[in-house]
Amino acid sequence: MDIFAILRSIRRHWLVTALVVVLTGVASAWLLLVMPRDYEARASFVLVNPAPAPSDAQIERDPTLAGINRNNPYLRFANEGTVGQVLSARVGGGTVREALVAQGADAGYTIGPSPTSAQIVDLVGTGSSAAEAETTLALVSARMEAELVALQKVYDADESALIKPLPVAEPTPGHVVVSGTIRSLVGIVGAGVILLFAAISIAEGRSALRREEARKGRHEAPEDDGTESSASVVAPRTDVPVTAAVPGPRPEPAVEVPAPSPARLDSREDEPVAPDRRPQPAGARADG
């Protein structure tokens, strides 16, 4: 179907088109004016490893260093991004999320390793207002620090042997997520276009069906009501003999001569016979 056929279909079904356009406009206006906006606040933390274990010389100078518990299991991983991955999975899990929501956080917050560095963790606090997004970010940040300490203190490691989070920059204030509104608006417009084409297709199908039914009704014969009309039934003639066609000239039609009546014949017998006055041959005259 080309663009001109589509325009003709829209013009033929302008009422359906107007209805779909009005519905799409109402939905878009509700999205922009009534639907709550999405806000978010962001923060990033870098995970800093603790100082290395004291050397033998340092232990000799200060024997108390030998008694420090440095049994931190996360210091044994060769991949520095392991701590960030485990921490993100734990804070983003269902149990911690439910606890944070109970404290007043929004359930849509996110936490995960930064794409720029494996040792950086990105946090995004969400909410229906700027204040709610900032509150969510603060609650998630505090819970992340607590969970990071709990992960490393499995064997009661000393504070000096723990990985600690440091903020990369100041958390951003809550702001409107324009991309989310645009995505929702594009989705509504797309749904309206799909609904318009579907409605026009259904209307075109119904119109074609009605035209087909009307065409069949015009070509159908009248129903038989038990009587035969003179216009439709013609009885064959039985008084005309059927003769085969014979090649050649057509014979002249016979002329019927009426026979004389008996009374007229009797009157002609009583009349005197007139002598024959025709000239006769010479021999016949002499004989007479």
Image (spheres, grey):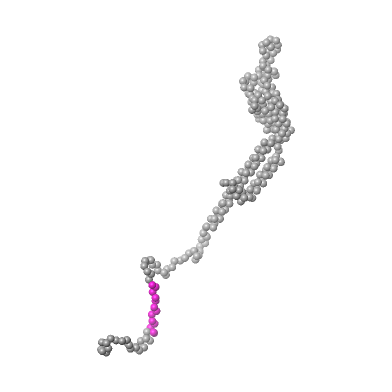
**Residue 163 figure quarter:** top right
Q: Nearer the viewer, residue 281 or 9?
A: 281
Q: How many marks?
A: 0
* 213 relative position to 29: left or right: left
Indicate the position of residue 259 as horizontal and vertical percent values.
38, 80
Residue 221 lies, with reference to residue 266, above or below; the image says above
Q: Main secondary structure of the magenta part?
A: loop
Residue placed furthest toward the right: 131
Q: Residue furthest front?
A: 282
Magenta stretch holds residue 96? no
Q: Quadrant of residue 197?
A: top right
- Chain part drawn in magenta: 252-264
Give the quarter of the image for residue 88: top right
Counting from the top left corner in percent of width and height, residue 82 is at 63, 23
Q: Quadrant of the C terminus?
A: bottom left
* Residue at position x 68%, y 44% in the image: 26
Q: Picture coordinates of residue 31 (x, y %)?
A: 69, 40
